[in-house]
């Protein structure tokens, strides 16, 4: 592979001999360019695969030859997060040398944004990790691997090193991360459980919203199970196989069961007008990045192979972390008559219960 400094513009020529079934953007994000997939969308001007034009979303095949042109990145375009000026309060569920698992509070921003003066989790994480000599985390969104909406509570995963960030990002991209969300919704879905495949796109008029489209959107897969239903409200367990913006909220609305407190996708609940969004990221399960790094250190060739195949070969064990249900949601459970004392038993599967999410989408609704 040959390339020059990305900040002056770049032309990459690379052979992808062993990167089968990996998206081009995922592959490029793993190169030592310090570019996220969102940055690649902004700066990638042309991709040629085997002398034919390609897209970032295309999948690599055996012995593909890639030629990629990237424009110069301006300083204001870099995904650099400024460290918080003072320590904020992080609710830490688990911490070791590689990862931080946080319990995100309601109304807290994951990343800083325009018009918001309060500290974000990303800034607080950088303050906490300021003793680490790992400047590369600045270019990897402070080590935060995924997002939660501002009013969604629950489990958030953070990498402490660039190497671990890359491994965890690959697990998300290859759909090896198992996610469980709890939601209190209006009414009850027509089925006890279902897996829904739809395309999502930004709403043409209300730009803060997303909507289901027949074509031209991003494919999404969402599994749900009804845990309880009574008095015109239900408690649902959502398992999103993909990670699209507002995915669960849009799917809940499409079922005729918008999430209580979701002012963007429904009207104020007549029964609970003062409640905010009742969506909680209950748990995350993923393969231990340290186990994966040990394999890669022993054999560099393994880095190019599918993580799912390697997991079966090396019998990697999963890590699973969960965040307690917030007080507001617990009180709502009691109000609608749901006994949450058995929740941990219901939502704590063993390793044998986990199934890898398929990469290929099923027929869409």
Image (cartoon, grey):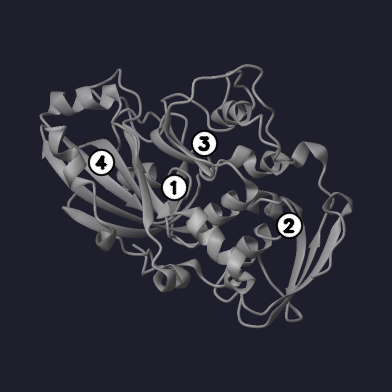
Q: Which corner quadrant holds the N terminus?
A: bottom right
In the drawing, does residue 257 fall left or right of residue 265?
A: left
Residue depth check, mark 2 versus mark 4: number of the one nearer the observer: 2
Real-space Cα distance between discs 4 and 1? 15 Å
Who comes first in sequence, dot 4 or dot 1?
A: 1
Q: In the picture shown, does residue 20 fall above or below 171?
A: below
What residue is shown at x 38% (from left), y 28% (from top)? 263
* Residues at circles 3 and 2 in contact by the CB criterion of under 8 Å: no
Real-space Cα distance between discs 2 and 4? 44 Å
Q: Residues within 10 Å of mark 2 (few under 14, many from 20)?
A: few
Residue 133 pos. (x, y %): 71, 37
Q: Which residue is mark 2?
A: 32
Identify the element where label 4 is drawn.
loop
Real-space Cα distance between discs 3 and 2? 34 Å
Which numbered marker is on residue 208?
3
Residue 267 pos. (x, y %): 33, 28
Q: In the picture shown, does residue 228 fall above or below 327?
A: below
Q: Quadrant of residue 122?
A: top right
Real-space Cα distance between discs 1 and 2? 36 Å
* Residues at circles 3 and 4 in contact by the CB criterion of under 8 Å: no
Which numbered marker is on residue 211?
1
Pick the residue in front: 109 or 348.
348
Who comes first in sequence, dot 3 or dot 4?
A: 3
Who comes first in sequence, dot 2 or dot 4?
A: 2
Q: Residues within 10 Å of mark 4 (few under 14, many from 20)?
A: many
Q: Quadrant of residue 32?
A: bottom right
Residue 21 pos. (x, y %): 54, 74
Q: Which corner quadrant holds the C terminus?
A: bottom left
Identify the element where label 3 is drawn.
loop
Residue depth check, mark 1 versus mark 2: number of the one nearer the observer: 2
Who comes first in sequence, dot 3 or dot 2?
A: 2
What residue is shown at x 41% (from left), y 63% (from top)? 316
């Amino acid at each position: 592979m040959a390339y020059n400094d990305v900040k002056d513009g770049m032309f990459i020529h690379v052979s992808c001999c062993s990167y089968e079934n990996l998206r081009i953007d995922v592959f490029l994000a793993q190169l030592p360019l310090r570019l996220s997939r969102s940055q690649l969308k902004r700066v990638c001007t042309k991709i040629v695969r085997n002398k034919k034009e390609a897209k970032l979303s295309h999948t690599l095949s055996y012995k593909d030859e890639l030629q990629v042109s990237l424009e110069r990145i301006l300083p204001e375009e870099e995904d650099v997060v400024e460290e918080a000026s003072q320590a904020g309060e992080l609710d830490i569920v688990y911490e070791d040398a590689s990862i931080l698992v946080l319990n995100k509070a309601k109304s807290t921003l994951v990343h800083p944004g325009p018009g918001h003066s309060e500290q974000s989790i990303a800034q607080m994480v950088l303050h906490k990790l300021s003793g680490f000599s790992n400047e590369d985390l600045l270019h990897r969104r402070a080590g935060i691997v995924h997002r939660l909406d501002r009013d969604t509570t629950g489990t958030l995963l953070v990498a402490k090193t660039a190497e671990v960030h890359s491994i965890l990002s690959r697990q998300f991209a290859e759909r090896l991360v198992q996610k469980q969300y709890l939601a209190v919704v209006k009414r009850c879905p027509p089925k006890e459980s279902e897996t829904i495949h739809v395309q999502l796109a930004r709403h043409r008029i209300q730009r803060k919203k997303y909507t289901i489209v027949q074509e031209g959107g991003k494919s999404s897969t969402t599994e749900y199970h009804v845990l309880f239903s009574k008095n015109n409200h239900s408690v649902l367990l959502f398992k999103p196989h993909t990670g699209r913006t507002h995915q669960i909220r849009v799917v809940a609305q499409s079922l005729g069961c918008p999430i209580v407190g979701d002012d963007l996708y429904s009207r104020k609940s007549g029964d609970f007008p003062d409640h905010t969004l009742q969506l909680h990221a209950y748990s995350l399960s993923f393969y231990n990045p340290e186990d994966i790094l040990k394999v890669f250190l022993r054999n560099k060739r393994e880095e190019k192979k599918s993580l799912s195949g390697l997991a079966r070969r090396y019998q990697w064990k999963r890590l699973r972390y969960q965040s307690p249900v917030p007080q507001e949601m617990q009180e709502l459970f009691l109000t609608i008559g749901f006994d949450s004392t058995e929740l941990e038993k219901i939502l704590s599967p063993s390793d044998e219960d986990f199934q890898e999410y398929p990469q290929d989408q099923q027929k869409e609704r």
